[in-house]
Image: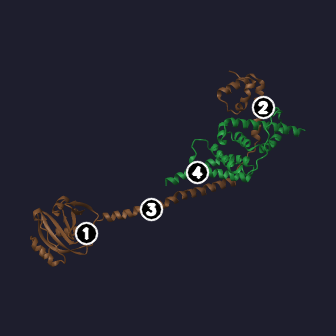
Amino acid sequence: MTIDCQGIKEYIYPFIDGQLDHSISLLVEGHLYGCPLCRLEVEQERNLDALIRRSIPKDKAPYSLREEIFRQIESWAERKNSRFFLPLLKPALITITGVFITFILFSVFNKPFPVFSEAVKGHIRFSQGNLPMGIVSAKAVEVSRWLQENLDFNVRAPDLSIQGAHLQGARVCILKDKRAAYLVYENSGHNLSVYMFEAKGLKFPKTKIVNVNNKIFYLAKEKGYNSALWIDGGIACIFVSDLNEVELLHLASL
Amino acid sequence: MFFWARNKSLKREFEEKILEHIDSLYNLAIRMTQNKQDAEDLVQEASLRAYRYFDKFKPGTNFKAWIMTIARNIYINDYRKKLKEPQKIDFEEVQNSIGLSEISGAQEEIFSESIQAVIDNLPEELRTTIILFYVEGFSYKELAGIMDIPIGTVMSRLYTARQILKKRLSRSIYQKER
């Protein structure tokens, strides 16, 4: 395929501009090689182009403009950063506050419940032999009578002998500013402390809750001792022992 | 922290790029607006807009073409309306062109003087096309992209501009010699 002098016309500018496809460019070159007239025309156009290129004014940006642009970019970057963070500030504060409150609540709830802690403390003191009994007796009736004499509320010493826990004695103690009956049982080598006090005003611990025979037991484990708390007829009862949870519940639920 | 660091490196990268092309940008702006103050404002606006949308710029593509496009769009939307368009040139068929190989040094000087005036009197589309093509060396395809026109239109604008310049050239040389 070849092109003639007429056909080359539309390709001259793209040709000198270097914008022709390689194959067409080769065709144009082929024609120019054999056609001095077209060659001259292309040469003239090239000269005109060079002249135009040289003659077009080329203005340089004033230095102050560069400075101004950099200053604007700087201030925009600052604004952008603050704009990016400002809308985040409120949710961030809310989130932080939320996390903080959750943390506080969590630590409060996870704090050993005071009644349990005191009960366990008493149990440890007794186990170490540092808690003398007000009455030493294995007889529930005797102990109950003694308790009635020493307390302003009515409690009876539970008889746990069927479950294998034998009464040792009792005393009066203070549990969370309340006078409480403190009884000690022995169950095949394990000590069992039993606290009984008026449940009025007692805040229920946020601990593990189990339901045994329609009775609600609050369970806790502290310093290696299991505790179970329940309320019966206005009297709160706490069992503390190194017995495991199931054994403790077995004693408490009957 | 990552946000700051990324922003900082993006900003530095942008500043380097804009510095590299600021003369081209300004030259285009002054040819388009034909007014120093407008040109400076336009360059500022284009630079800041480019910076704001720099995350949309695809790395590896032509930054110069990208920023020229932004500048041109700002000019079209914000400046062209308020500026008085220069007198349109009637694109009559150019018959009497002279042989350019015969131009002497003195004639070229005359031509250079008159060519600036001629360019300034061209319609904006042709001015911009000439600047982007001759000064900035964009290809037809890039020109089409920057001005958002088909390649055929780029070619016809260049053709028209060349014919006008050729015609003015012969006329100015003819007038000076007379």
B131 vs B11, left or right, is: right
As drawn, the chain in green is: B
Q: Which residue is mark 3?
A: A94
Q: Which residue is mark 1?
A: A115
Residue B114, label in figure:
none
Residue in the image at 28% along x and 66% along y: A205
Marks 1,2: beta carbons within 8 A: no
Q: Which residue is mark 4?
A: B12
Share a chain, discs 3 and 1?
yes
Foreground mark, 2 or 3?
Answer: 3
Share a chain, discs 2 and 4?
no
Marks 2 and 3 sit apart, C-alpha to C-alpha, by: 75 Å
As drawn, the chain in brown is: A
Asked if residue B167 is positioned above or below residue A136 in the image, the reply reads above
Which three-letter amino acid code belongs to the residue tagged 2? Gln
Q: Which residue is mark 2?
A: A44
